[in-house]
Amino acid sequence: MSDTTLMVLGVLAASAAGLWAWRRWHYPSFWLAAAFPLTAISVRASWRKVALGCNLTKKRQRFWFTTVPGLVASTGVVRVRRKWQRIAVDTKPFMWLPKPTRHGWRVTLHTLEGQIPADYTNAAERLAHSWGVHAIRVSSPRPGRVVLAATVRDPLVRVETLPASPELLKVIVGRLETGGPWIIDFKTVPHHINAGATQSGKSNLANALVQGLAPQLVALVGFDLKGGVEFTPYSPRLSALGTTRTECTALLDDLVGLMTSRMAQCREAGARNIWQLPDDQRPVPIVVLVDELAELYLMADKSEKDEIAKTSTALLRVAQLGRAFGIYLFCCGQRIGSDLGPGVTALRAQCSGRICHRVNDPETATMTLGDLDPAALASARAIPAETPGVAIVASQDGQWYRARSFYVSEQAAELAATTYTDLTPSWDEVVSGRTTPPTDADLATFLDSIPDPRKA
């Protein structure tokens, strides 16, 4: 083998190793500089065939040069000629240039006559297989336009870091399948239902919420119907904790009374909600974490009927009226079905936030996601057991996504609850209305003086 051949082979091997290392250690720059341009060319070049295969084309009359038979020569050869005539042609939707994203690419299409975004949604899986990507999501920013967002590889395989919460009552708890952050914003979506079977990641999501809300100026209230085994370790950061139905009923009575007093306060100030009050008069917001929601509605005998009815009514009143007065619900449960009674169905109607982890029965998935896209229901039931933390989320933008929460151990959440225990208002002060949040400057000074539990 000549020296030139050895040199060429060495250069090729070094280039391949360099590309592999580049892709392995800094994939974002590799994707933008090397992989995406080739992908964009391939997508544009194959669009006609892909659209035809996915039934996204339309027949249109076009003038086209066609080959038609002519006269037969004396030699027996058929003479053909080109003719300009009008024929039916398969027309593909117009495609703009693909644009890169962090985990793939997106492209805008002009829909053809008679097409709607649902036509592209139904063909999303075919499009993903045709282009060899993990998934394609369809959105429509305005009439006549459809945006295809492709995810090259699943961003939910590894979800590690938990960034700090950006603002009050907003917590980043995980990542969406689009690669964007999964944010639970209580101001925008005040009440949530979190359903999931054992070991599905439901409790981990509650841990992430506790860790994210602990450094914020909020009062946390826990309803732990497992006898307190879930939320007792976080009691230093909880203003109140109910471990039995009787204790939870008493706390709900306090919350209803608190809403009444805050109603009067807002009425006197001419405000529609507590966020329109002056900073020095605004009461502290309250987040109620409910674990094992079904235990509030299960009845062993008829003697518990009145207590269950009282609990159901109080919880429903909090869900209906609490948002304007700074009271928010996050209800978790393994089993959430209509067989628990009309109170659960009414509560579900008030909870705009829907989170469904892997469930054991289809009714729980239907109860949580049934009024959304049927495809969301099918995706929830297809979550494998070996991917804890993966859930179907009804986002505040009106769409549903696959998402996965960051892993937060009980020790990490307990450390956050212990570290920020000085921010915990007593329940008596909250109910009496004597507690008002400090200013932003006071909060910044306090947070700078204590260690971050995520770095411990």
Image: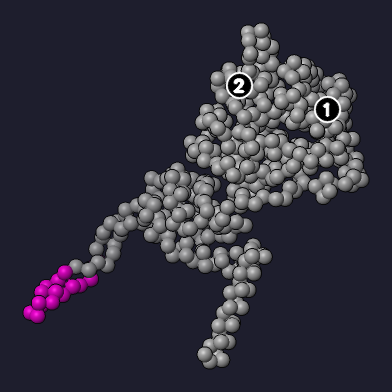
Corner quadrant of residue 413: top right
Decide which of 430, 130 is in the foreground and name it.
Answer: 130
Q: Which residue is mark 2?
A: 344
- The answer to whether residue 71 is magenta is yes
Q: Kindly report the secondary structure that dominates the magenta region of the rendered protein.
A: strand
Q: From this viewpoint, is residue 35 visible?
A: yes
Decide which of 70, 178 is in the foreground and name it.
Answer: 178
Residue at screen point 59% across, 48% down: 177
The image position of residue 46, as x and y in percent, is: 42, 62
Q: Is residue 374 above or below residue 243?
A: below
Residue at screen point 18% across, 73% down: 80
Label 2: state its secondary structure: helix
Q: Earlier in the sequence, mark 2 or mark 1?
A: 1
Residue at screen point 85% across, 24% down: 427
Residue at screen point 49% across, 38% down: 378
Q: Residues within 10 Å of mark 2 (few under 14, many from 20)?
A: many
Q: Residues within 10 Å of mark 1 (few under 14, many from 20)?
A: many
Q: Disc 2 and disc 1: Cα gap in Å?
A: 26 Å
Label 1: state its secondary structure: strand
- Judged from this view, the residue extending furthest toward the top is 303
Q: Write down the region rendered in magenta.
A: 69-84
The image position of residue 455, as x and y in percent, is: 82, 50
Instruction: Please name the amino acid that badge 2 sits on.
Output: Val
Numbered mark located on residue 239 in the image: 1
Instruction: Please name the amino acid that badge 1 sits on.
Output: Ser
